[in-house]
Amino acid sequence: MLSRMLIYHAFLHYQRRMPIRQYVVYFGKEKLNMESRLASDSLTYQYQLVDLRTFPYQTFLQSAHGQEVLLAILADFGEESPALIAGQILLKLRQVSESELQLAQRVLQLVRLAVLRNLSTTVFNAAQHMALHIDIKEDALYQLGKEATALNLLKEGFPPEAVARLTELPFARIMQLKLELDASRKES
């Protein structure tokens, strides 16, 4: 990352000829272990490294903006239970959302971010406990999973009608997947 950031800095400096401040925001699962400073005989370079886990979750929970509230799931929980914090985040999202649609979108975003902390099940369960409607079936990743399942069923020789019924995908899409599968088999 250090070399890449140095290249970005050089490129921006060449193009803009103005002062540049660079930040990398880290929200990984593992402890932060990344260099942010380079010092050699002819060059000294440094960028700012921000680890979201060093911020207390309350910092983000106090925001009036849903996008910022979402970041609480990536922050430091201290000694508090993840389930309790997930519930607090969901309550705050309910307060700051302007519509049910926006709330549903934010909850899906929260579930996705929670994956980065192995908390997606915790968040999903907290949302269900609060009677929040999460229509995971409308999610693009869910749809891709259904198509992957359909392809696997077609590879195993299931008839297209059965695949359409089992995956709840339109029959026309199943036939399209079957044609793609047949074409890829001919190329092999």
Image (spheres, grey):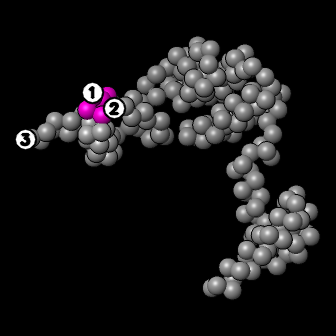
Whether residue 79 is visible to the viewer of this picture, yes or no, is no
Tell me the tag on residue 22: 2
Mark in the foreground, 2 or 1: 1
Neighbours of disc 3 within 10 Å: few (<14), some (14-19), many (20+): few
Where the C terminus falls, by quadrant?
bottom right
Neighbours of disc 2 within 10 Å: few (<14), some (14-19), many (20+): few
Neighbours of disc 1 within 10 Å: few (<14), some (14-19), many (20+): few
Residue for point 88% across, 72% down: 160
Q: Position of residue 32 (x, y in %)?
A: 38, 37
- Given contact means CB atoms under 8 Å apart, are the residues at marks 2 and 1 in contact? no
Marks 3/1: CA–CA distance:
22 Å
Q: What's under tag 1, amino acid-wise?
A: Pro
Give the quarter of the image for residue 88: top right
Q: What's under tag 3, amino acid-wise?
A: Asp
Q: What's under tag 2, amino acid-wise?
A: Gln
Whether residue 150 is visible to the viewer of this picture, yes or no, is yes
Marks 2/3: CA–CA distance:
22 Å
169 or 119, nearer to the observer = 169
In the rendered structure, which segment of residues is drawn in magenta?
16-22
| Marked residue nearer the N-terminal end (2 or 3) | 2
Tell me the tag on residue 41: 3
- Residue at the spot of label 1: 19
Q: Is residue 109 left or right of residue 11?
A: right
| Marked residue nearer the N-terminal end (3 or 1) | 1
Could you tell me which secondary element the residue under label 1 belongs to?
loop
Q: Is residue 146 left or right of residue 84?
A: right
Q: Position of residue 171 (x, y in %)?
A: 89, 65
Mark in the foreground, 2 or 3: 2
